[in-house]
Image (spheres, rainbow, N blue to C red):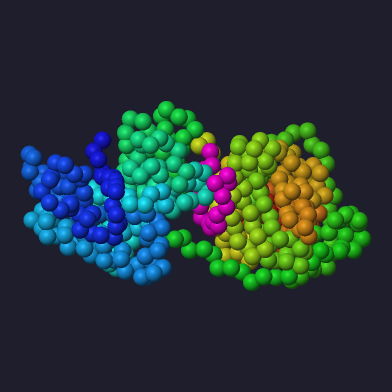
Amino acid sequence: MPIYVQHEVIGKVPDVFNGEAIWQAPGLALFARRPLLRDLLERSPREHKGRAATRCFSHVTLMLPQEEVEDDYHLTRGAKARELAQTLTALHQKDFGDLLGADQVRYDVVGAQALPPGQIEVRFGHAVYLPAPGEKILYNVSVSRDSAVWKPVCPIYPNQRLALIGGDDGHASFAASGWPFGADAAILLINDGPDAPPQVQMRPRDGFDCRFDARNGYHTITSRHDAGARLLLKVGRAGAAAAAAPPAPAKAAVWQARPASHADAPGQEPTALPLSHRPPPRAAESDATYAPLAQQRVSVVALALPRLSRYRDSGATALEIPFDRALAVGAGGGKAISFSVDANDELHACTEAGRERVSAPASFAPLDARALRLLAVAPEMADRYCATLCLAQPVGVPVASGARFVFGRNAAALAALRLLDGPGFLQCGGGGASADRIGLSRNAFSFEATPQGFHIGRIAPAQALYHLDEALRFVARIDEAGAAAPYLLPPGHHLVAGHYVLRFDV
């Protein structure tokens, strides 16, 4: 593999800010001294013809002991470091002027914690680039082990053609956090300008698989020799962040006590409902009767993540949804990733790598086999929900045609669909509670499979219901739907009630 980054160490320097002493030793004893910066640049030209150099490198990063750099900043506001860069730039132009062409000489002086006193590290090469003053960033490069927590690696500038990304052993242009591959492995990023997509290649080529996931916008890099070694690389244009949905105004909520005449059984735990959605109660329909033939199916395909600010008076402070290593809701098989919504409606993804704020649309692949998608909600639903989290695998139950079923907190027949009905999901008043306490009534709605589709009937007047099509696009809010005039939901379409996005299939 070509050497993209020349990494050299210059030791025994009495004054690390003395540019002349770093550049070239005095006298003519050329074979009796250690190589200094001028010798290193001369021995490693950028281009050569035979043994004669035709171009030299012009961008050099100089790393000094961290304590020396900090003392210079404290005492002189960094004047010695600036003077060092200016001195080396002048010496570079004087001695290699005929090998520079139109290239500008640029030096950068930084601190390195691991360097002992009197030692200097130097980096230059094909993949070392220092931006011009005022040059704007073209791309931002970040990496992740799980697609949820992304760590920044480096910027890429318009005139920067190569970048070499590796571990923290100093042999690359930039170090990637959590580097899972060996010291000899590296990612080569090639930039041919803003009109051409950046290229990502692995070094060595035969040890890795590198594929681009166009839907998620990142490269997945896996080792052919270590099944557990995987890294995700994202190269995003600077300033191209996805626009987030505007935050909806917070609405107060209370734990609403219902009259005994309502179908919700008295004495049960109340439901948190926004104060603006508290219509008078109405008699509920009965639960479904058994029919032996089940040709239809109802599945939970996604979770509608609520805006907790609507339920501020209920004491709800956070909703957390963990996924195990099979990407099923729950952490019984070891938590792979979790998503949380806080009281300010901010959404975070949490993995072993840490916690990071996220926004929709996005996709998360903590494991190679499956992915979780985060979708933005339609404006008509944005006052109630902050995002829709699509499950990696739907959870469904069969239902019989000709029978009427009820979905809600009291509907035992469909309890398997209520994935968030447990004590560990909703943080409320210092303890855990079922997330179904907010947004889902005891008896929310009824449905019946018919040859034309599914007849939907609202039971709880305050229950919000939304119709989404087969691609989870918003169709309508279901305001009026009763036994006499039910709402017809076509097969394959979805209904949103509480946190659940239900698909009705024939």
The N terminus, quarter of image: top left
Image coords of residue 324 (percent x, y): 63, 39
Residue 355: in magenta span: yes
In the depicted view, which residue is nearer to us: 392 or 153? 153
Q: In the displayed orientation, state which residue is furthest to the top.
A: 225
In the depicted view, which residue is nearer to us: 195 or 287? 195
Q: Is residue 195 left or right of residue 270?
A: left
Q: Please report the residue visible at 48 percent of the width from the left and 63 percent of the height from the top.
A: 243
Vertical comparison of 300 with 426: above or below: above
Q: Is residue 348 left or right of residue 226?
A: right
Q: Is residue 333 left or right of residue 13?
A: right
Stretch of the chain drawn in magenta = 351-367
Q: Please report the residue visible at 76 percent of the width from the left and 67 percent of the height from the top.
A: 313
In the depicted view, which residue is nearer to us: 188 or 418? 188
Image quadrant where residue 72 sits: bottom left
Image coords of residue 429 (percent x, y): 78, 60
> How many marks do you count on the picture?
0
Image coords of residue 102 (percent x, y): 13, 59
